[in-house]
Amino acid sequence: MGVNVLVKRVLEGIGISPERYNLQWASAAEAPRFVKLITEFTKKISDLGPLGHAEGIKPEELKARIDRAVELVNSQKLRMSFGTTTKALRKDKDYSDAHLAEVIDAKLGKAIAAGL
């Protein structure tokens, strides 16, 4: 759950639409739901167009931004901070999207901005 917010914040930070990321759960017994999720996401991505094009980012710049994002999410500092943040989220027992976003922004916002 917190991973969704983290990934979306990193995408926003490098100028890529966070709509390009979607993580949903579907069990093996939920084939119709799975098909619906994939169909909707495929349509959304198709509507957005090629990565970088819709965002107005040239290919060379896009690669540089993605490289910075990968470096950030692989950094020990961010990973340790995220681990600490998830412990706090479990303690709160509030997994609403608004609360997750609030906590991630408060505890990791500066680290994300500095890393990008």
Image (tube, rainbow, N blue to C red):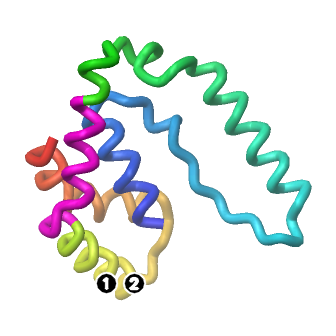
Decide which of 67, 90 is in the foreground and name it. Answer: 67
Magenta stretch: includes residue 77: yes
The residue under the point 19% across, 74% down is 80
Q: Position of residue 15 (x, y in %)?
A: 31, 28
Residue located at (52% from left, 36% from top): 20
Q: Most extreme residue toward the bottom, as rendered?
A: 91
Say whether residue 88 is left or right of residue 46.
Answer: left
Q: Place residue 17 in its image quadrant.
A: top left
Say what secondary structure mark 1 lies in.
helix
> Residue 116: which numbered mark, if any?
none
Residue holding disc 1: 87
Q: Position of residue 38 (x, y in %)?
A: 75, 44
Q: Amino acid at mark 2?
A: Arg
Q: Which residues are magenta?
A: 64-78
Q: Position of residue 111 (x, y in %)?
A: 13, 55
Residue matched to label 2: 90
Residue positioned 47% across, 24% down in the render: 51
Spatial separation of the CA atoms under disc 1 and disc 2:
5 Å
- Which of these two is toward me, 80 or 84? 80
Q: Amino acid at mark 1?
A: Lys
Labels 1 & 2 near each other (Cβ < 8 A): yes
Residue 76 percent across, percent down from the top left: 16, 69
Q: Is residue 60 above or below residue 95?
A: above
